[in-house]
Amino acid sequence: MRFIAFATASGPALGLRIGNEVVNLTAEGLPSTLEALLQQGAVGLERARVAAEKGRTRIPLEQIQYLAPINNPAKAIAVGLNFKDHAAESNFQPPTYPVLFNRFPSSWVGHNAPIVRPHVSERFDYEGELLVVIGKAGRYIDEAKALEHVAGYSVFNDGSIRDYQTKSAQWMMGKNFDRSGGFGPEFVTADELPAGAKGLKLQTRLNGQVLQDSNTSDMIFDVAQLIAICSVAFELVPGDMIVAGTPAGVGAARKPPVFMKAGDVCEVEIEGVGLLSNPVVDEA
């Protein structure tokens, strides 16, 4: 199933895409957010399937104003240097333990919404990434059973303010400027994709030019490993997100560097998951 969060006159709503239409699940009595639906477990997903089959409230896809699939997770964990080629271009040794940091909900927007270059920096970089959504709670999760905890996947642009990212050994500031990242366009349940979302082509394009071209199989720590490792510190709960890292080709490593500026359009596409597109604007 492919879920879309979208705006309506009465507030946020959750829909299920069927072809070129979206069934308004919220109008059918289901929750208005994906995280609330995921908290209902398999029962909630089955309710969504049944409601979509009735399909009394359908909206053409082109009329949708997208929201990020999840806007209020308990935890949003991002992973740095999770591709060997990206670690190399960043002058780091490949990590033997994941580089983890937080990403705050105020730092991302949905599909087609503008991402914002702050006026304090001209080093606004793109990072195309696979996003993992937890569907089943767990602590100290066994790697062999970790994929049982995955609800599904989406696409993320981990927009980074590079000069602030490198001001200290901690990356939080450079990764959390308001509205600097993109998330969407939809959430795809795990059963629609290969186990662990492995073997999927990942590509980032800026104004149509391919700048990142890789595959999710090239991650140093795969989805199961990331879940197992993160769950050692805290319980993962439905709606939690893991942004699984970016491959080589980021703007800061290019010669000369390539950074996003107002008027650009950045696209991140992951095979079978979707195409996330965001225009770039300057901070007002």
Image (cartoon, rainbow, N blue to C red):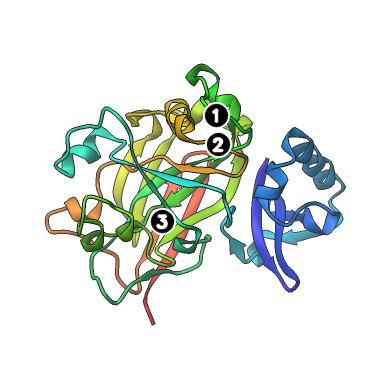
Q: How far across and how far down the image is residue 254, in percent?
A: 16, 53
* Residue identifier under label 2: 236
**Extreme top residue here?**
144
* Residue identifier under label 3: 267
The count of marks equals 3
- Distance between mark 2 and mark 3 Cα atoms: 29 Å
Q: Quick one: label 1, few (<14), some, or many (20+) residues within 10 Å? A: some
Q: What amino acid is found at the position of numbered circle 3 in the picture?
A: Glu
Q: Quadrant of the C terminus?
A: bottom left
Q: Residue at x 50, y 67 (%)?
A: 113
Residue 44 in view (yes/no): yes
Q: How far across and how far down the image is residue 201, in percent?
A: 41, 37
Q: What amino acid is found at the position of numbered circle 2 in the picture?
A: Leu
Question: In the image, is 175 to the left or to the right of 259?
Answer: right
* Residue identifier under label 1: 139
- Depth-wise, is mark 1 or mark 3 nearer the camera? 1
